[in-house]
Amino acid sequence: MTTYLDNQTSGIPPARHISGRPLKTLAQRLKGKEGRFRSNLSGKRVNFSARTVISPDPNLSINEIGVPAEIARELTLPVRVTTQNLEWCKNLIKLTAQEEKPSDKYRPRVNYVKRYREGLEQRMKVTEKNADDISEKLELGFIIERQLMDGDIALFNRQPSLHRMSMMAHRIKVMPNRSFRFNLSVCPHITLILMVMK
C-alpha cells in the first residue's frame, strides 16, 4: 500500500516493473518538473499579457513600470461607453483615423469596438478607413478596446513566483525601446528570486 502512494519512501525498497524500472506512483505523478502540477496545470496561455526582457531605469518612480510602445499598442483595456465618457471615446476613435508616423510620440488609440445584439457579440476592428464611421455610430453600452496609456495599472509577474514580491502592481508609463523597465529600488525584489533559486 505504501508503494502505491510513494515509491521513494526511505527504508522500503521501491516496487519495480518486470523490466526492472521503478513504478511511477501517485506521488511521482504529481511532484517535480514533469509532474502534473508543473507540467500540465501551471502553465497556461492567457490573453491580455506580454513578455519581454526587464531592465532598470532610475528615472521611473518606484510604482511605475516602463512598457514598450509596441506592447502598449497590442494590449488593450475594455472601456464601456457611458454618458460621462461618450465624447472622450469618440475622440479616441477619431484619433485612430489619423496616420501614425514612427517619429510621432505615442498616443493611445482604439483597436476594437464591441457591441452586443440579441445575445451575440459583434466585434469591429477600427482602422484608419472606418474610424470616422464607427465614431459616429458609437452608442451607450458599446465597449471600446483602447490601447494602454500612462497611468493604467498592470500586474507584473517574474517567474518563478516563489514569494509575494515576484508579483506586483505598477502604473504604466509607455516608453520607447523594447524592454520592461523598473526603478532600481524595485529590481532587488525581482532579482531576489534568482538568489532563492541558487
Image (cartoon, rainbow, N blue to C red):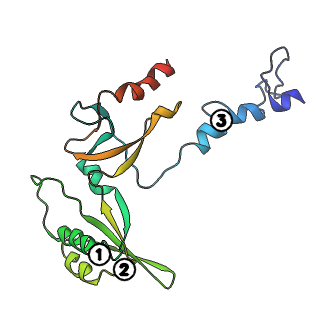
Q: From the viewer's perspective, is residue 161 above or below residue 114?
A: above
Graded by Cα atoms within 10 Å as few (under 14), some (14 to 19) or many (20 or more), the crowding at tag 1 reads some
Q: Where does the image place residue 70, in percent across and percent down from the top left? A: 25, 50
Q: How many marks?
A: 3
Quick one: which residue is furthest to the bottom in this view?
118
Which quadrant of the figure has residue 114? Answer: bottom left
Q: Tell me the kind of residue under disc 2.
A: Leu
Question: Do residues under tags 1 and 2 come within 8 Å of each other at their CB atoms?
Answer: yes
Graded by Cα atoms within 10 Å as few (under 14), some (14 to 19) or many (20 or more), the crowding at tag 3 reads some
Q: From the viewer's perspective, is residue 188 above or below residue 153?
A: above
Of residues 166 and 86, the one nearer the viewer is 86
The residue that disc 1 covers is: 86
Q: Tell me the kind of residue under disc 3.
A: Gly
Q: Is residue 155 visible?
A: yes
> SS of the residue at dot 2?
loop
> SS of the residue at dot 3?
loop
Q: Tell me the kind of residue under disc 1.
A: Leu
The residue that disc 2 covers is: 140
Q: Where does the image place residue 29, in percent across and percent down from the top left? A: 71, 35
In front of the other: label 3 or label 1? 1
Q: From the viewer's perspective, is residue 102 above or below residue 114?
A: above
